Image: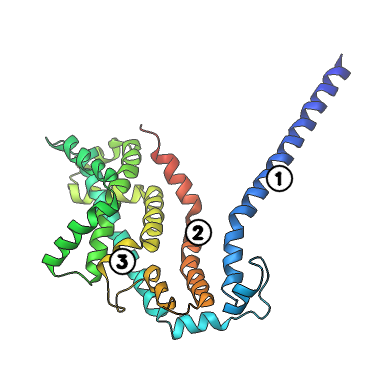
Amino acid sequence: MAQIQNEGQNEKTMLTRIGMILLYICLIVVALFQLYPLIWLAMFSLKTNTEVFGLSPFALPQDPQWVNYLNVWENGNINVYFFNSVWITVTSVVLTLLLASFVTFAITRMNWKLNKLTLGLFMVGLMVPIHSALIPLFAFFLELNIVNHPLSLILAYTAFNLPLTIMILLGFYYTLPKEIEEAAVVDGCSVHRIFFQITLPMTTPVMATTAIINMIYNWNEFVFVNTFISSDKWKTLTVGIQNFIGQYSTDWGAIGATLMISIIPVLIAFLVLSDRIVEGIAAGSVKG
């Protein structure tokens, strides 16, 4: 009897191992499909126009053109576009997180008559398509005289990212114990000190999640930049790529190099904060 049980357990163990092996094989195949576009883009960025059109799309570059990266950085104005993308993205993310934290704290921790209505109005913002707001925003920014100015991008990014950021923060704020804040009130702590010294530090995991989500959106955004910005002085990477597309010729290697330069910061940020992203989403998905 014991021998039969041992054989049954061995069969289950073997089936479990086979299942895990098949699962890992499937995951590896999926990972290769996900990584291949990046590998292909890296090879594409090292080719000349002749290689792009004369060789197979899957062929390796015969003579890697590392000079493509140097040319786009020095002669293609990509250094200006890159730093514009960096500071506009960082400013928008910081402003969005700060304002969203104010709103979420006021909704979850303070009692006032228009509490639910305000939350509803912010959630309505999730249903507003970007394209439907372009003309009203352009007219509004034109009156404020901030068209072709980075402030128009910062305001637009902040406004459109606030609803999603608030929605993510809400779930996390509901899980925070109110007893800590009540004890601070008893000790004579003001509302401002409670927020900045107690509540805000406790929301670090979900703040990292929303920061990377906002960063990816702001970094890759094209429509607002293409609509509101016309000067090379304030263009970002997503629009600056168009400079390499001419009426009669296009430098495809330079375009590939620019795309690789624009992808690398997002990949680094995602790899560094990937654990925080999962932790923040999991923590914010349960209402306590």
**Colour scheme employed for the rendering of this structure:** rainbow
Residue 136, by quadrant, is bottom left
Which amino acid does the dot numbered 2 rest on?
Val
- Counting from the top left corner in percent of width and height, residue 79 is at 41, 79
Residue 38, by quadrant, is bottom right
Give the SS element for disc 2.
Answer: helix
Query: Residue at the spot x=23%, y=72% of the render?
Result: 148
Query: Residue at the spot x=12%, y=66% of the render?
Result: 144
| Most foreground residue, 248 or 245 | 248
Q: CA distance from mark 2 to mark 1?
A: 26 Å
Query: Residue at the spot x=68%, y=40% of the render?
Result: 23
Query: Residue at the spot x=29%, y=53% of the render?
Result: 130
The correct choice, above or below, for 179 with respect to 37 in the image is: above
Which amino acid does the dot numbered 3 rest on?
Val
Residue 236, by quadrant, is bottom left
Residue under numbered circle 3 = 225
- Counting from the top left corner in percent of width and height, residue 69 is at 52, 79
- Counting from the top left corner in percent of width and height, residue 280 is at 42, 45
Give the SS element for disc 3.
Answer: helix
Residue 216 visible within the image: yes
Crowding around mark 2 (Cα neighbors within 10 Å: few <14, some 14 to 19, many 20+) is: few
Q: Are marks 2 and 3 in contact (CB under 8 Å)?
A: no
Q: Are marks 3 and 1 in contact (CB under 8 Å)?
A: no
Which amino acid does the dot numbered 1 rest on?
Ile
Task: Say whether disc 3 or disc 1 marks the residue closer to the N-terminus.
Answer: 1
The circle on residue 25 is 1
Residue 196 visible within the image: no
Give the SS element for disc 1.
Answer: helix
Residue under numbered circle 2 = 272
Give the label, 3 or 1, closer to the camera.
Answer: 3
